[in-house]
Amino acid sequence: MSSSARPLVLAVALLAGCGRKDSPPPAPPEVLEARKLLAEAGFPGGVGFPTLELLYNTDEYHQKIAAAIQEMWRVNLGVAVDLRNLEFPIFMGMVHRGEFDIARQAYVGEYADPYAFLELFSADSRSNSTGWQSPRYEELLASSEATSDPSRRREALEQAERVLLDGVPLFPIFHYVAHNMIKPFVKGVFPNTRDIHPLQGVTLEGANAPKDGVLIFNGGAEPRSLDPALSQDVGGYKILMHLLEGLVMPDAKEGAPQPALADRWDVSEDGRTWTFHLREAKWSNGDPVTAGDFVYSWRRAVDPKTGSGYSHRMYALRGAREIVKGDADPSTLGVRALDERTLEVSLVRRTPYFLQILCINLFFPVHRATVEKHGARFMEPGNAVVNGPYVMTEWSLKKRKVFVRNPAYRAVDEVKLAKFIFLAVENADTAFNLYEGGQCHWLFRIPLAYVDIRRADHWVNPYNATYFYAFNTRKKPLDDGRVRKALSLAVDREKIAKYILRGGETPATRLVPPPSQLR
Amino acid sequence: MELAIQGRSPTQLALGRFRKNRRAWISFWLLLVLGLSTVVVPWSTSHDFRTQTLERSKEAPNGTYWMGTDANGRDLMVRTFMGGRISFAVGLLATVISLAIGVAYGAIAGFIRGKTDTLMMRFVDVLYGLPHMFLVIIAMAIFGKTFLLVFIILGCFSWMTMARIVRGQVLSLREKEFVEAARALGVSTGSIISRHMIPNILGPVIVYATLTVPSVMLQESFLSFLGLGISEPQTSWGVLINEGANSLNPIRVYWWLVVFPGSFLALTLFTLNSVGDGLRDAFDVQQR
Amino acid sequence: MLAFLAKRVAGGILTLFVIGSLCFFITRFAPGSPLTGEKKLPPEVLRNLERAYNLDQPIVTQYLHQLKGYLTGDFGLSFRYLGKRVDELIFPSFATSVYLGALGFCLAMLQGVAIGVLAAARHNRVPDYVSMSFALAGISIPNFLLGPLLVMAFALWRQWLPVAGWPEDLSAGELLKLVLPVTTLSLVHTAYISRLTRAGMMDVLSRDYIRTARAKGLSESAVLLRHALKNGITPVVSYAGPMAAYVFTGSVVVEKIFAIPGMGQHFVDSSLARDYPMIMGTMLVYSALIIVFNILVDVAYSLLDPRVRLT
């Protein structure tokens, strides 16, 4: 061959020679079992398995986890999936309608009890789009509600969870942790599994404390609404719990319910009637806070006309289900005012976690005259009449909200922090930069890139939430439990938690996270 | 007697001038090599672009991974070259479409003027005003998610400014004497546009075409982020740079995630622009 | 001139109407609904919400309802930020975006034209290479990369400038907040404009009348600025129209990085959330700007080259 061609041929030969690809590492026992199950189900080595779609909402975290799962299934099982991401509203729409194969989900328990998570998969739960049902599961859940013996209840719930995990309508990935970055001069903050921090007891002391004594907290994205009946997100709650006060409110140390507007209560023998005795308290315009306010507010929250997507949290109350269905009038709700300061609540059955539910913003009182006068804008500064420790004096959409101590608050002397500002900076990196620069004193979201920095001002603690993927059990071949089990076994959750998330999240083999597990 | 001198067409003359422009000529070959490397290198390296070694995620460049690894423990080098395939394809196809439609549209509107021009330009205004994201979503819903569709859509969104630039050039050009002369000679409108207008506006057009490429690459990364473009494990330079930019922070410097894909993008754009400049110089009818 | 403007404005209003109508149907035709939230809504609640938002009516009725609203100055309520009106959400953010955009636009035009003229005048010599390399940097570095880099360099490593935010008042300290976002926003456009200027100028500089002007003994700057620039700048003027509209309505990326409450975020967020009234509002503002700037561009064409007649 010609002299000019020879080097070319050599180069090609060299290149051709170094095209060996990495060989995969030996498979651990779970993967071997997964392969066996898959073969039993009729797809040995993944051959013949249709290409399914893994659906998640657009986010950096979700993308990396989904990519890892996709690759794990390809290498371990020979199963190929397509990844698809959609923006949140469209994603949720498809999930609600069951138009998915495998979809990412996460659930934050509003109260620390296994039931908060297990009821998601009961037959009449609106959150169950997997198509999975089990009569045994329903039986166990019902028996846990019927008994008043805590150990029998625990037994029933644990058995129910086993039934759920054996049925594999979902495969959990990890249990969340709460991250907070808090400047050292912020005192009076206690990490807790609800990640709820009432700011009344916070003080700013020590070197570098801001001279004006104003705490600046980044609350993240702007909440959709500050109507307590409508607000469903954590951001909205963090604001509402400072403006309004319910019968009980979460305490600073553990986020556990403690007496707030109600200073004591009586529970009937069968646990179905609770009588709350209210303290003397006033709204910010001088009107007294009465039991009638609670009756009005709760009826409003459960009324379908108000449009709350959260009203199922009222199902513990008698009559709530029928009202939400539209079959009964809101006035039939199991709550009535015995007098100005006594509230009687009727429950469907004994509910051990009822006090925890009462902490939800759905049960906060609203000032009737203000709602009737200002309609959807009743929480705007200038219109709003509140009964909580703070009043909102400024609401610049997507910028910030300013809160000032409410002089009409019933325990105004206990409110140590006179003023705080809630920023609405959505970008976690920008928020972090502001924090570093001293223009923000408290963050609760750390960007993925450095979530493992472990500095002294970085607080990490378990959080009452789980991240999982749900199967659409109506879709072939996901209707076969062996296939679902195989897919679940082939995912290495340890590696995902340790190398992708890096934030201290715990790999999950069950649905109920540690804070909600009963001892 | 044989003709000792052979006539050469204007195109041949132009190409000859292009070859003599050393910077442009070298850039042309460099661009070609870059394009080919995106095809050859992934095939010849020892890492697959999909293989995730999670224990070795976010590693700086080292012996095993020459350009380091990404957050999922994948070799950044092979992914950078694989990404180049998509970026080259997107850049090329979308720009070709944009050129084809934009030049014709703008030249016709600018030359004919009158009601046709007004109508054509109002139509462009309307197109600007429509929400592009929704059109992409609807197109995806109708036609399904294919590569080709993404390229076509991106091309369809880029031709409008090209058309405006071309129209602007033609507006001045048509008032020149040589146009009057051509008309007087009875040359048809179509001929005037194609043989006289278009060659004279090539300068800014070529330059804008080379400017369209990076814009299209970045739009593709935005669409992919929203789930409307390519999806894992496929990648493109825009997506890689996006991921790298998200990892930028004052605490941990994952510089390789940005530097490598970014350098490749920059190098490609540099050579592309040099080629564009060279072509512009070569086809400049008045530079003799 | 007046007749021209009147005709164009009238045409502009018609165009806005067409755009608005098309927007309306396109957004509703796309998959997704504003009513899907994290929790699945009970059927009765969903029915009530649809009634409240008029979403249960036939689409033509909804269209006419919206049209009537627009004609009477009522732009509707946002579906996403409950209780807030579209105009009170858009206009303050629009004002912010206009300030930011105007600064970016002026900076980009001034710098871009200057660099482009210099490069064209010193074609294929050192200043040309230097300025075109700078332009290349501007084109290759996307703003989502440039922003964080600038912040890291000038606000964190060397704390010369504030990290983020929008000026609260006109004090020097607050105004410094503008430096990084304006730079990030304008750099890519400076690069584009410089390249387009250079291309346009080079076309013009080789023409006969320039040779004549030089032969007449005019100074280089007079030749460049008084004679060549008018014609060489045409591609820039064409590009400036859409660019101005884009820059004035806010860049999502710059706003997110620097926490600026501008209109760009509303564009993207409202689309993602299927907040139909907000989508209409933002698209119409953007379209109105495009139309206005294109009218200005056409006027500019005729001012720069008197042979181009306004029709």
Image (cartoon, coloured by chain):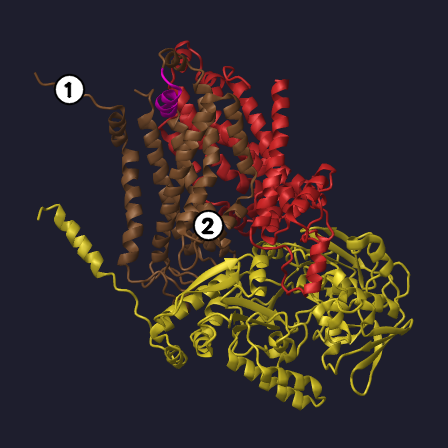
Q: Is residue B197 magenta?
A: yes
* Residue B166 visible in the picture: no
The image shows residue C88 at horizontal and vertical percentages of 72, 44
Place residue B191 in its image quadrant: top left
In this view, the residue farthest toward the top is: C216
Q: Residue C248 at x, y = what percent?
A: 60, 37
Q: Nearer the viewer, residue A384 or B268?
A: A384
Q: Position of residue B278 (x, y in %)?
A: 32, 31
Image hue for chain B = brown
Colour-to-chain, yellow: A
Q: Secondary structure at mark 2?
A: helix
- Report in which chain the residue with disc 2 lies: B
Check disc 1 and give the amino acid type. Ile
In the figure, A83 relative to A513: above or below? above
The residue depicted at 51 percent of the width and 21 percent of the height is B114
* Residue that label 1 marks: B5
